[in-house]
Image: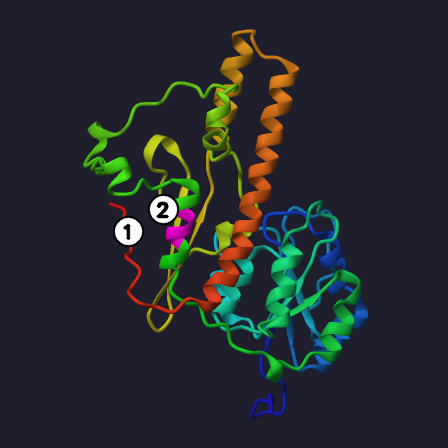
Amino acid sequence: MGEADDGSKSKRVVFVTVGTTCFDSLVRAVDTQEVREALFKKGYTHLVIQMGRGSYIPTKSTGEDGSLSVDYFTFSSSIAEFLKSASLVISHAGSGSIFETLRLRKPLIVVVNEDLMDNHQSELAEELAERKHLFCARPQTLYETISAMDLGSLVAYQPGDATPVAKFINSETSVFPPGNHEDLPVSPPQDDDQRLQEPEPVNLHPPLDGIRKWKRLHLGVIQTGIFHVADKVRKYVTCKVGVWLLAWTAGGVAAMVLVSILQRRVLIWWRRRMQRGSSRSSSKESLMLVIREKDKKIDQLLLQMAQMNEILLARRRVPVIQVK
């Protein structure tokens, strides 16, 4: 099995991706002789490494001496083709890369970056590993994971209907206003002339009864590999709020909606505040506290999305928004 007609091994590719970040410890781990030999013993013939912004350069090999062929690159406009052609994927713990690989039903080893502070990504990887959708490792345990892995033990990931998840996100973030908000009809603009004007800067000191609304402002920025989840990245909508709608199709329509918002507006507002000379250190500290709080809330929301998506049953098809 795995042999070509001429007795040589058929091509089996291991694709390693670190996303847009620097993850040198993972690149170093797959570049060790023991990991290369372990992959070769498992029947893999080629190792392709997407090294991102890292400074460590792996060693190339043509494989002409009967060993593993190794190549690398920094970035690509799309890694979809690399994922599709891979027999095994070794990935960082970004939710985008994880779910895109699982959607393609590729065997996956997720390597957690322990250098990241407040590493919520490990929780997602460990949860999916417990459900046997993937293998979870650290850079220092990658060799043991490869040597012991049994691909036959993996359970295919079945994405469910994300409509309830999308509704939950909408209710939490209010990115898309409900159709009957406060019993008033709300309709989207029909053309460019009807787009909303830029609102006034947000007051940094809201009244006490408005604290809850203030906390619901979209100050978090999702900076993981979400950009690799979608094959299609859509445009910014109302007031340049960043909204990414990802539509997945696999034997039906399955979608997950992730939201990335308001960093640009906060920076513009902050610069205006500084130019007016009315900025104070206490104001800046309170703003950063709110930003960190929202970052944490959105991180938790991502994990909840992954868990909820497992148990929700499809009752109706997810409407796909076509952007003209």
Q: Position of residue 76 (x, y in %)?
A: 53, 53
Q: Nearer the viewer, residue 195 or 293?
A: 293
Tag 1: amino acid: Ile
- Mark closer to the chain start, 2 or 1: 2
Residue 252, x across and y down, in percent: 33, 70
Q: Is residue 170 left or right of residue 298?
A: left
Question: Does residue 224 appear in this view?
Answer: no
Q: Is residue 144 above or below residue 177?
A: below
Give SS at disc 2.
loop
- The C terminus lies in quadrant: top left
Residue located beneath label 1 in the image = 321
Of residues 178 and 59, which is closer to you in this image? 178
Screen quadrant of the N terminus: bottom right
Q: Nearer the viewer, residue 215 or 45?
A: 215
Residue 148 relative to residue 209: left or right:
right
Residue 9 % position (x, y) = 62, 85
- Residue visible at 57% across and 48% down in the picture: 299
In the visual, does 128 lie left or right of 188?
Answer: right
**Which residue matches tag 2?**
234
Does the segment drawn in magenta span residue 169? yes
Point out the stretch of residues depicted in magenta: 166-170
**How much space separates mark 2 and mark 1, taking CA atoms?**
10 Å
Query: Quarter of the image holding residue 200?
Result: top left
**143 shown above or below 233:** below
Specify whether 223 is left or right of 265.
Answer: right
What label sits on residue 259 in the rendered view?
none
Question: Given contact means CB atoms under 8 Å apart, are the residues at marks 2 and 1 in contact?
Answer: yes
Main secondary structure type of the part rendered in magenta:
helix
| Of marks 2 and 1, the one in the foreground | 1
Residue depicted at x 60% and y 84%: 152
Q: Quadrant of residue 37?
A: bottom right
**Residue 203 located within the stretch drawn in magenta:** no
